[in-house]
């Protein structure tokens, strides 16, 4: 198996080498063609110039002699082409030996002789009459001077150099690009492995400039956070529950053992006490069940339009006797002409009100007072429950909504499980509602709940 970095580098380098090869080939063909065309043009101009020269020579003398225009032989010899001058009857006036220019290569390194020797014949005219013929012979269709050859070599050299440079640059760039792709993937896969091994604290901090990789990184980080959160909840729940379960069990065990050993008498009072512990234990389990119901991420809510006032009235009615038994003056204030409509799950909202009122009664001493007021603002339905109870210590306030948290006094003097307010908070969060607490130790507490109102 190959790494993504290696695979990407190979692909990028191969594609660029292919592209470079094709463009080099095209550039080379184009340059050679244009250059050859240029050389042919120069050659044609040379031929026209020589013919013109010989026509002038003929015009001057009116006939051909062995010395007519021989001076151009030197240039021809130096430039590696052979000339043969013939008169009008095609008889040779003078001519060069093609063999000389082959040997000439050794003497004069200016010109290269390659290819087959070919000749071209041109007419020499005077007063529209053909007065002679000139044969120009050379090796190859075009003659290359050493400058031409050098030019061609240097062009090729530059092309080869640019190809080598381009390949080097491509390799470097592809290494860099493939690193940009492989690094985030490698990191995310490392984090996934860590998460699957139970190390939920790992996070990826290296941001990527590629949108999809950044999304992937964020998702894995969120996954890590959720797993860590769930793990913490699980661990805390297990330790909290085992602690809460251990206490009534210890009481039961110690009392039962004392009864078996004959230290305690088995009488109705002691049995009633033990039964109360069992009931408390049962309540704890019931509360845990209720908490589990509202804690699931996908808690099914039966949302509908409900009158908050009607639910509150029915709950207050249920608590009337309990509060009277404790001599607590429970007053409910609301406006009869308002409906206090909200969208919510009837049973869950009822649970919220029950938990808050039962706490108020529980933590308020005899002859205390509980004021429940229901108000409606432009956008909200607000329920306030004020009691003149024990109040909550300042240091306890931030934790009262936490699972199984119980205030100091409550833990020692008043029965409870520390789950009621956690359930309240969870239900309110599911309803996008809010709760605020104000409390002063020894004076009382105010719990205010804010719901979005239906207009
Ligand atoms: P529980 O009432 O079973 O102990 P809750 O979750 O309902 O658990 O409340 C958590 C804690 O918050 C209580 O133990 C108590 O210390 C404090 N608390 C809640 N409501 C009141 C109140 N009305 N007056 C005083 N303390 C309160």
Image (cartoon, grey):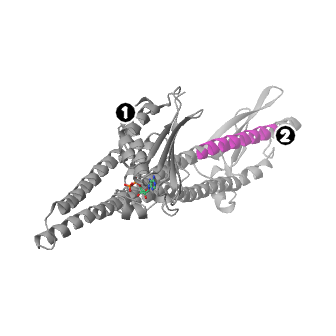
Q: Which residue is mark 2?
A: 57
Q: Closer to the camera, 101 or 430?
A: 430
On the rendered structure, is 54 left or right of 97? right
In this orientation, does residue 151 appear?
Answer: yes
Q: Closer to the camera, 249 or 84?
A: 249
The kind of secondary structure element at disc 1 is: loop
Provide the residue span drawn in magenta: 27-52
Image point (25%, 63%), residue name: 248
Displayed quadrant of residue 230: bottom left
Picture coordinates of residue 386 (x, y %)?
51, 47
Q: Closer to the camera, 64 or 158?
A: 158
The kind of secondary structure element at disc 2 is: helix
Displayed quadrant of residue 164: bottom right
Quarter of the picture holding the C terminus:
top right
Q: Is residue 43 magenta?
A: yes
On the rendered structure, is 105 left or right of 298? right
Q: Determine the quadrant in which ligand 1 lies.
A: bottom left
Q: Which residue is mark 1?
A: 302
Q: Closer to the camera, 378 or 441?
A: 441
Classify 10 Å Cα crowding around label 2: few (below 14), some (14-19), many (20 and above).
some
On the rendered structure, is 240 left or right of 262? right
Picture coordinates of residue 352 (x, y %)?
41, 43
């Amino acid at each position: 198996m190959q790494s993504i970095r290696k695979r990407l580098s190979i692909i990028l380098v191969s594609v660029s080498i292919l592209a470079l090869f094709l463009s080099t080939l095209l550039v080379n063909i184009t340059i050679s063609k244009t250059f050859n065309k240029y050389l042919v043009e120069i050659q044609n101009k040379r031929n026209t110039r020589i013919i013109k020269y010989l026509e002038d020579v003929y015009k001057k003398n009116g006939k051909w002699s062995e010395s007519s225009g021989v001076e151009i032989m030197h240039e021809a010899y130096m430039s590696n082409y052979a000339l043969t001058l013939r008169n009008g009857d095609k008889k040779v006036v003078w001519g060069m030996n093609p063999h000389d220019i082959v040997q000439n290569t050794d003497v004069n390194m200016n010109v290269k002789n390659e290819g087959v020797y070919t000749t071209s014949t041109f007419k020499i005219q005077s007063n529209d009459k053909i007065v002679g013929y000139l044969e120009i012979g050379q090796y190859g269709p075009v003659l290359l001077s050493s400058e031409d050859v050098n030019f061609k070599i240097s062009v090729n050299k530059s092309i080869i150099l640019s190809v080598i440079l381009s390949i080097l640059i491509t390799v470097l760039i592809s290494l860099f690009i493939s690193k940009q792709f492989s690094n985030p993937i490698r990191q995310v896969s490392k984090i996934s492995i860590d998460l699957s091994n139970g190390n939920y604290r790992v996070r990826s901090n290296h941001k990527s400039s590629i949108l999809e990789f950044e999304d992937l990184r964020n998702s894995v980080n969120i996954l890590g956070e959720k797993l860590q959160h769930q793990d913490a909840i699980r661990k805390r729940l297990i330790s909290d529950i085992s602690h809460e379960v251990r206490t009534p069990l210890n009481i039961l065990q110690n009392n039962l053992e004392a009864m078996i050993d004959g230290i305690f008498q088995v009488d109705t009072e002691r049995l009633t006490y033990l039964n109360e512990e069992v009931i408390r234990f049962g309540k704890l389990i019931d509360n845990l069940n209720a908490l589990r119901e509202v804690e699931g991420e996908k808690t099914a809510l039966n949302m509908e339009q409900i009158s908050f006032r009607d639910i509150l009235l029915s709950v207050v009615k249920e608590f009337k006797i309990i509060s009277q038994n404790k001599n607590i003056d429970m007053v409910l204030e609301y406006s009869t002409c308002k409906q206090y409509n909200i969208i919510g799950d009837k049973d869950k909202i009822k649970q919220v009100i029950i938990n808050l009122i039962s706490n108020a009664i529980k933590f308020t001493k005899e002859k205390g007072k509980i004021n429940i007021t229901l108000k409606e603002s432009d956008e909200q339905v607000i329920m306030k429950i004020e009691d003149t109870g024990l109040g909550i210590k300042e240091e306890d306030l931030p934790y009262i909504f936490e699972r199984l948290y119980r205030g100091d006094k409550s833990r020692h003097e008043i029965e409870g499980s520390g789950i009621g307010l956690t359930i309240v908070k969870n239900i309110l969060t599911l309803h996008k509602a809010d709760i605020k607490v104000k409390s002063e130790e020894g004076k009382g507490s105010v719990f205010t709940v804010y719901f979005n109102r239906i207009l």
